[in-house]
Amino acid sequence: MKMKLALQSIVLLAVFCVQQAGAQNVAINGTGAAPAPSAMLDIASTTTGLLIPRMTSAQRIAIAAPATGLKVYDTTTGTFWYFNGVVWVEELSGTNGWMLAGNTLAGTEWMGSVNNQPVRFVSNNLERMRILGAGNVVVGATAAVSGLDLFDVVGTVASPYAVNGYAAGNASGVWGQGGSATGFGVIGRNTNASGTGVLAAGNNAALTYLVAGSGGSFNGTGTGLVGWATTAASGTGIAGSGNNSGVTTLVSGSGGAFRATTTGLFSYSTTAGVGEAVYTNQFGNIVRVNYWSGATQFKIAGAGTMPVACAVKDDNGVDRTMYCSESPEFYFEDYGQGQLVNGRAHIDIDTLLAKHIIIDDKHPLRVYIQIEGDENCKGVVVKNKTGNGFDVVEMQGGNSNATFQWHIVCNVNDVDLGNGRISHLADVRFAPMGEPHEQIDQPAAVAPVKPGTAEAGQAPQPAPAPANKPK
């Protein structure tokens, strides 16, 4: 009976300490202060806290018909949970959520998805990037351009830099390494017909690209194939390694450095019109490789009087230059030795050579003879020239058996390249060279100029038909 009265006294004392303000506001404190007018329940203490119900996850889940907003502390997970009217929701904290100002990490935390769903990144309420379930990183798109790509950047803004993806550095602007012998370290793709797949400049050189578009455009003050290294004069713009062969760069720097165990650099042009697989410009001197002028297919075509050369060693092991001869027409040549028999000889042209030359009144066979070993020979003439051979006859009815050297020069016949294209070779003479088709943007001190500020370049012009040779 005494115990019951003591409990009642404690309850009455607690009720006495709870001050009511108006009809509803309640304050719990040790000072007798009134509750704040905006608070239904005002609990004040400087030495104790509020302890809400604690239970295990099983006990929390077993609560019958939990009210919306009901909150408990889950001892199994060590976190607070509240019921949102449909499901229980765990409150996030610095240990189980990513804080906007950063987290203190132990090294086991991670971000991402636990199922095959992409991780999306959004700015201005628009998705900008996502990491796909397969591991591909896609910027500006929702799917990988190719399943072989690890990193895809897809842009829609038309400008010199396409705002598709930009990487810059003092040493290497972009560095990529393929994971297998058939992998690609860096892939650039522009879906616009006049776009450029990869645009790079090195040695702080100007960015240069073709108005007609290309797979890659590389420029440098020291080396023609380049990337962009913003401040280091000896930097490399793009370093590529194939077949897991490592990377080799030039000490003086370059825009691009490509190395592989088989093919270091592969270039492919798909146009059926005027174009080339490789277009180079060395301080205004333009050379094209695998070039179609619109009338003739060239292996190498260069403007100006630029020689084709090779190197040989001198007695001191120093490389010395040897030059190839050039001519206004396209010729095949052959050399050989013959012998007169009673003053006559017939020379057959190699059957393989004969398949690729044209011999007629407009394209005569040019034959040059040098007699050897018989000073009594009366001289020779060449007769009966055809596409298969020619006769050598001693003059004045001579019947010597002198030996001779012969040299023939022949016009090359036209070649059917397939796909409706004929490379006109037989009548080409001083054929027009293609015009430059570049657009050059001035280099910036640190970063490229803003998109859209570059001057317009000159579009490529089809080469006119080959001029007829003089008769």
Image (tube, helix red, strand yellow):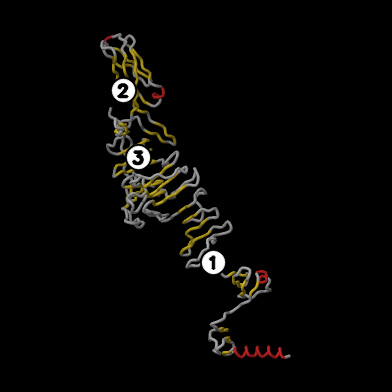
Residue 176 to residue 392: above or below: below
Element at label 3: strand
Q: How far is the residue under mark 3 from the one under mark 1?
A: 58 Å
Q: Considering only order in the chain, which callout, 2 or 3, is on the residue closer to the N terminus?
A: 3
Q: Nearer the viewer, mark 2 or mark 1?
A: 1
Q: Considering only order in the chain, which callout, 1 or 2, is on the residue closer to the N terminus?
A: 1
Q: Callout 3 environment at 10 Å: few (<14), some (14 to 19), or many (20+)?
A: many
| Nearer-the-camera pick, 163 or 57 | 57
Name the residue type under label 2.
Arg
| Nearer-the-camera pick, 108 or 326 | 108
Q: Which residue is mark 2?
A: 366
| Nearer-the-camera pick, 81 or 301 | 81
Q: Nearer the viewer, mark 3 or mark 2?
A: 3
Residue 169 to residue 260: above or below: below
Q: Which residue is mark 3?
A: 288
Q: Which residue is mark 1?
A: 97
Q: Can residue 393 be seen?
A: yes
Residue 404 to residue 96: above or below: above
Q: How far is the residue under mark 3 from the one under mark 2?
A: 30 Å
| Relative image position of residue 387 (x, y in whole percent) | 37, 21
Residue at screen point 36% across, 48% down: 209
Q: Callout 2 environment at 10 Å: few (<14), some (14 to 19), or many (20+)?
A: some
Name the residue type under label 1.
Gly
The N terminus, quarter of image: bottom right
Residue at screen point 31% across, 47% down: 221
Residue furthest front in the image: 2
Element at label 2: strand
Task: Left or right? Give the position of 14 relative to 453.
Answer: right
Q: Can residue 268 be seen?
A: no
- Asked if marks 2 and 1 touch (Cβ < 8 Å), the reply is no
